[in-house]
Image (cartoon, rainbow, N blue to C red):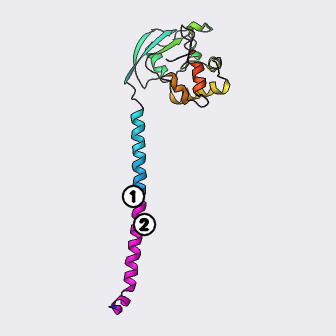
Amino acid sequence: MLELLRKNIFLIVIVIAISGFLLLNNDEIDEKATQLNSASTSTNILKEEIPDQPPTVIIDVKGEVLQPGVYEMDSKSRVDDVIKIAGGFTKSADQTMVNLAQKVQDEMIIVIPKIGETSAGNEPNVSGNDKVRINYATKAEIEGLNGIGPSKAQAILQYREENGFFKKIDDLLLVSGIGEKTLENLKDDVQIP
């Protein structure tokens, strides 16, 4: 038996080496599969937390368009699409006051002012109760809010451009630099939508 073992020692060493290699690689494969499964689960959780946007939204268009009114639009539409459906701008419309690339959202109000018109009641970012409509406000108007300086105002604008409209007041907590204390100061002065 000892002689047989000596003759086959080379084969035994090779079998042991291959077995060890397979065991080590199997652990790495299991670890990678676990990581992929974890990433897939995280993605599914994120999908569940983000509510689906309805297929259509209702938009109110006012001011200097040929056909003001309420329009039902696809939820993936832009302000430019709504203006076109409303017949386009009138000759006296101040087109510089409107972000045509902005995505629409349900219950959105688009007010197109006349050229040179500066009345706060006609601007799309101030509501009738003097609250700032944060989804439409300019940087200067956001800076006018209690506790908001130039950098926080810019952060709000940047967040709005990258992520779309704020759906609820607590969404402001997602903006860099805005915490619970700042949010509490804003609640009485901000309107969404």
Q: Which residue is mark 2?
A: 24
Amino acid type, residue under disc 2 in the picture: Leu
Q: Position of residue 95 (x, y in %)?
A: 57, 15
Residue 71 is labelled as none
| Callout 1 crowding tier (Cα within 10 Å): few <14, some 14–19, many ≥20 | few
* In magenta segment, residue 112: no
Q: Is residue 78 left or right of residue 185?
A: left
Amino acid type, residue under disc 1 in the picture: Asp
| Callout 2 crowding tier (Cα within 10 Å): few <14, some 14–19, many ≥20 | few
Q: Which residue is mark 1?
A: 30
Q: Can see residue 170?
A: yes
Query: Residue at the spot x=62%, y=19% of the render?
Result: 142
Q: Quadrant of the N terminus?
A: bottom left
Q: Is residue 170 left or right of residue 116?
A: left
Q: As drawn, which residue projects farthest toward the left? A: 1
SS under mark 1 = helix
* Image quadrant where residue 96 sits: top right
Q: Position of residue 144 (x, y in %)?
A: 65, 17
Look at the picture and state if 155 lies above or below 106. Answer: below
